[in-house]
């Protein structure tokens, strides 16, 4: 995947949607899960008693898509902390963790 100058959106909800759409466009087996996935699918959680802020985004990724999804995320990277953690321009860090079965999981944390 080639490097490009896509700016990371400052609103994590918009950024989660952008990354999810990019994964779909690339044909990756990767899905946004958790609170942001619900926020995107259920407008009723955007206001009233269910409204809240979001600090991270979570994706479920097939083993076959892991390398390409990592490449998608790397196009957003401005610094690398370790081989498994990269920091994005505005939002925070994306960390890869290896499960007991050898599969990767990814999480992002804002600061």
Image (cartoon, grey):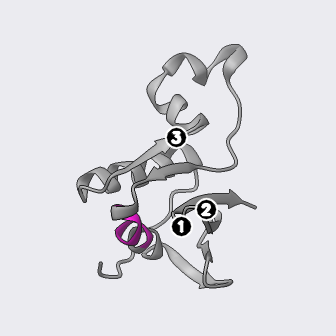
Task: Indicate the position of residue 20 as horizontal and vertical percent values.
Answer: 40, 49
Viewer-nearest of discs 3 and 1: 1
Residue at image location 59% in from the left, 49% down from the top: 57
Task: Indicate the position of residue 28 as horizontal and vertical percent values.
Answer: 30, 56
Task: Indicate the position of residue 91 as horizontal and vertical percent values.
Answer: 63, 62
Task: Indicate the position of residue 36 as horizontal and vertical percent values.
Answer: 56, 38
Cα–Cα gap, marks 1 and 2: 5 Å
Q: Mark 3 falls on what kind of element?
A: strand
Residue at image location 56% in from the left, 81% down from the top: 78
Farthest residue in the front direction? 101
Of the pair 64 and 27, the residue shown nearer to us: 64
Residue 6 placement: quadrant:
bottom left
What stretch of residues is rendered in magenta?
65-70
Main SS of the magenta part reads: helix
Q: Mark 2 falls on what kind of element?
A: loop
Of the pair 58 and 13, the residue shown nearer to us: 58
Tag 3 residue:
33
Q: Mark 1 falls on what kind of element?
A: loop
Tag 2 residue:
99
**Is the C terminus in the top left, top right, bottom left or bottom right quadrant?**
bottom right
Cα–Cα gap, marks 3 and 1: 21 Å
Residue at image location 72% in from the left, 15% down from the top: 49
Q: Are marks 3 and 1 in contact (CB under 8 Å)?
A: no
Q: Is residue 43 left or right of residue 64?
A: right
Q: How packed is label 2: few (under 14 Cα within 10 Å), some, or many (20 or more)? A: few
Tag 1 residue:
102
Residue at image location 54% in from the left, 30% down from the top: 39
Q: Are marks 1 and 2 in contact (CB under 8 Å)?
A: yes
**Is the N terminus in the top left, top right, bottom left or bottom right quadrant?**
bottom left
Count of numbered badges drawn on the protein: 3
Choose the circle earlier in sequence order: 3 or 1. 3
Of the pair 70 and 17, the residue shown nearer to us: 70
């Amino acid at each position: 995947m080639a490097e490009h100058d896509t700016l990371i959106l400052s609103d994590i909800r918009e950024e989660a949607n952008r990354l999810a759409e990019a994964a779909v466009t690339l044909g990756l087996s990767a899905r946004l899960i958790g609170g942001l996935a619900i926020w995107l699918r259920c407008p009723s959680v955007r206001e009233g008693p269910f409204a809240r802020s979001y600090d991270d985004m979570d994706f479920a990724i097939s083993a076959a898509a892991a390398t390409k999804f990592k490449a998608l995320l790397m196009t957003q990277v401005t610094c690398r902390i370790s081989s498994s953690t990269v920091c994005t321009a505005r939002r925070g860090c994306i960390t890869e963790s290896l499960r007991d079965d050898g599969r990767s999981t990814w999480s992002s944390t804002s600061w």
